[in-house]
Amino acid sequence: GDSVTQMEGPVTLSEEAFLTINCTYTATGYPSLFWYVQYPGEGLQLLLKATKADDKGSNKGFEATYRKETTSFHLEKGSVQVSDSAVYFCALSSLYTGANSKLTFGKGITLSVRP
Amino acid sequence: EAQVTQNPRYLITVTGKKLTVTCSQNMNHEYMSWYRQDPGLGLRQIYYSMNVEVTDKGDVPEGYKVSRKEKRNFPLILESPSPNQTSLYFCASSWGGSLRNSPLHFGNGTRLTVT
């Protein structure tokens, strides 16, 4: 079945540091890929997405590129801020049966940015 | 304001006492779903609904019931809660079509403790 693997956390960075959060996936065909962010006490929000190979999703300074050859969708940001402290989830939606029924999420990783 | 509203935000109950967590969305979305979030496991889907009167099991449906009598509401029912259902629960909705292209909108969560 489909699965998403995220790097182990938590991650603690200083403000203005470079961020990379790794995400790899297993799926039949070419899924759509997503990053969701969960701020403290809130529900998840869509951060960015990519629907086909080599697409780059971007939002709020974050970027992720859909790499079919490495089945990866790593999240990056050039300069993190304290306000980026949150839990980040990588997710996919399959192309085939069940495509409309759910997203498959990774375990999530907690990012803490210190001033 | 477009939103998914869950109630209550926090709930402490005892084993075996039936409870209902409500979920309502004001975006006229066709698709709704319930997830539970547990440390180290990420989000797992409990049930989903593609439209009124259409519901189906997700990955972890045991011990839960749902109903979709109206488009806007999708309550989660625990007939006889047990301690292993202690978790953070999220309701989510989407306009429908394919989750590959339409993002999930999440509520702010319900933290349930079963003693």
Image (tube, rainbow, N blue to C red):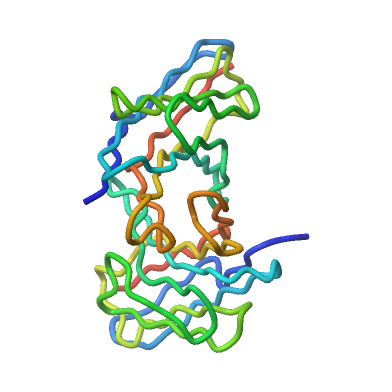
Image position of A109 (left or right of B5): left
Left or right of residue A3: residue A22:
right
Where on the picture, by quarter, is residue A72? top left
Q: Position of residue B97 (x, y in %)?
A: 54, 62
Percent x, y for residue B86?
33, 66
> Taking B58 as reference, is B97 left or right?
right
Against B75, residue A113 (above or below) is: above
**Figure quadrant of the C terminus of chain A:** top right
**Residue found at the very far left of the displayed protein:** A1
Against A68, is B55 above or below?
A: below
**From what the image shows, is residue A29 above or below residue A69?**
below
How many marks the image carries: the answer is: 0
Residue situated in front as seen by the camera: A11 or B91: B91
Q: Where's residue B31, x and y in %?
A: 53, 68
Which residue is found at the position 57% from the left and 24% from the top? A62
* Relative depth, front residue between B5 and B113: B5
> Residue visible at 34% across and 87% down?
B79
Q: Is residue A30 left or right of residue B29?
A: left
Which image quadrant is residue B82 in?
bottom left
- Seen at 29% across and 36% down, the residue is A25
Pick out the residue farthest to the right: B1
Is residue B61 positioned above or below B101 on the image?
below
Q: Position of residue B71 (x, y in %)?
A: 61, 80
Compare residues A35 and B88 and report the one nearer the observer: A35
